[in-house]
Image (cartoon, rainbow, N blue to C red):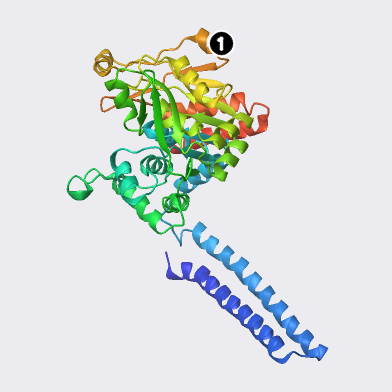
Amino acid sequence: MKITDWLKPGIKVKRWILFAIFGMILIIFGLNELSRHMLYNWYYKGFYILLNVTGIFVLYISVTEGIKSIMALINKGYLKFSLDSRKLETLIYEKRLLVKGPKIVVIGGGTGLSTMLRGLKYYTSNITAIVTVADDGGGSGDLREDLGILPPGDIRNCILALADTEPLMEELLQYRFKDGRLKNQSFGNLFLAAMDGISDNFEDAVKKMSSVLAVTGRVMPVTLENMVLKAKLQNGSIVEGESNIPEEAIKQNSPIDSIIIEPADAKALKESVEAIKDADAIILGPGSLYTSVIPNLLVKDISDALHKTSALKIYISNIMTQPGETDDYDVADHIKAIMKHGGDGIVDYVITNAGTIEEELKERYLKENSKLVTKDEEELARLNVKIIDSNLVKTRKGLVRHDSEKLASVIVETIMEKKLFYDRKKIIEYFYLSERLKQKKN
């Protein structure tokens, strides 16, 4: 390739840059003369006004033609970018898909919620995660006691689940110190605590951290008040503290009867109530029934909004029972507990697991008094809750978890079929973009 081959289009770009500078000079000169002399002679005033108009026209022509020249350089291969065309095309399809996705509000906390969010963010950017702040154990509990901030752990996990970060950044934020005074403390918790220190309140700190990590959707605490969780066991005793409740239920060999929060009149964030009002679907769980899901329903503004919304209300059933919380519970027992604390009609559909696990893994869980959650279809029918079955099991490092991709797919398909079925055009366009995105990624 001769040097003159790329010099010619390059010279054109330089010419338009000089032309743009000339236009700006005309505008600046004309405005300066008009403001300095306050000309009363209409002949001169008209001349300088014309000068400004000419300058604007010159600037417009130079910018538009300059862009055309730059595009010509790109098309001919004289200018190259690090982002290849295939990745760029995939990115465009992905963003188009996400903004057209359903409006989903997820309510809960713990590992189950963040697992689900990792799958959902590939279907929609219209996600609002409302997260419990009752945690008082581990590193979150230490920061809550030492700094007087709301527990950051569950919120940190949800932010990371929705974040568009490099693996190294996520590994850093999830890192736990192994020695010293910071032993077992998460760097992500410290990051959020530091952000709280330079913010007006905890809500603002969460927004700033979400912005830094390019979060898809929104994450917000269920309340900004110092919420404390208490449980009444069936033997009548009262247990205080989220981390103590399952331990005491096991120790006293008495199941949980009910849960309360203090302050009982804790206020929800206005944004979370509005998100519930505008949602296409509300997702409860997955997660610890009494210590992650139900505490959010005890915030009166949240439960009131759930009863008023026309959104589809879906509960994600846990795969395994949890010792000290849901021993021997089936799916109907989970929903009865939710309705007991949040009111009837708070669940329309339940997504349950139809998969199984290996006998060796099943035996290992049984030794810890945990087993697969079963379902009684007749009892669920009496509760007026419809069932959606799917194989959602994923085992990782000997632990049973929800498969985030399968779960997200089932959720979105359910919303489209049960809630947005009337908007055929939206469904066709959404799934067309979804299929194109899959093809591009493959």
Q: Residues within 10 Å of mark 1 (few under 14, many from 20)?
A: few
Indicate the amino acid at tag 1.
Answer: Arg
Instruction: Please indicate whether residue 74 sits to the left or right of residue 188 in the image.
Output: right
Question: Where in the figure is residue 385, as x and y percent of width and height?
Answer: 55, 17
Helix, strand or loop under label 1: helix
Q: Quadrant of the N terminus?
A: bottom left
User: In front here: 52 or 440?
Assistant: 52
Q: Please give the name of the residue rendered at 65% of the width and 82% of the height, measured from the top-left corner.
A: 26
Residue 271 versus residue 61 in the image, above or below: above
Residue 186 versus residue 419 in the image, above or below: below
Instruction: Please indicate whether residue 428 sits to the left or right of residue 122 in the image.
Output: right
- Can residue 280 be spotted in the picture? no
The residue sitting at the top extreme is: 378
User: In front here: 167 or 264?
Assistant: 264
**Residue named by callout 1:** 382
Question: Where in the figure is residue 223, as x and y percent of width and height?
Answer: 48, 42
| Picture quadrant where residue 356 is located | top left
Q: Quadrant of the C terminus?
A: top left
Question: Where in the figure is residue 17, as x and y percent of width and height?
Answer: 55, 74
- Can residue 182 be spotted in the picture? yes
| Picture quadrant where residue 393 is located | top left
The residue sitting at the front extreme is: 236
Q: Please give the name of the residue rendered at 37% of the width and 44% of the height, measured from the top-left corner.
A: 152
Instruction: Please indicate whether residue 80 sits to the left or right of residue 398 in the image.
Output: right
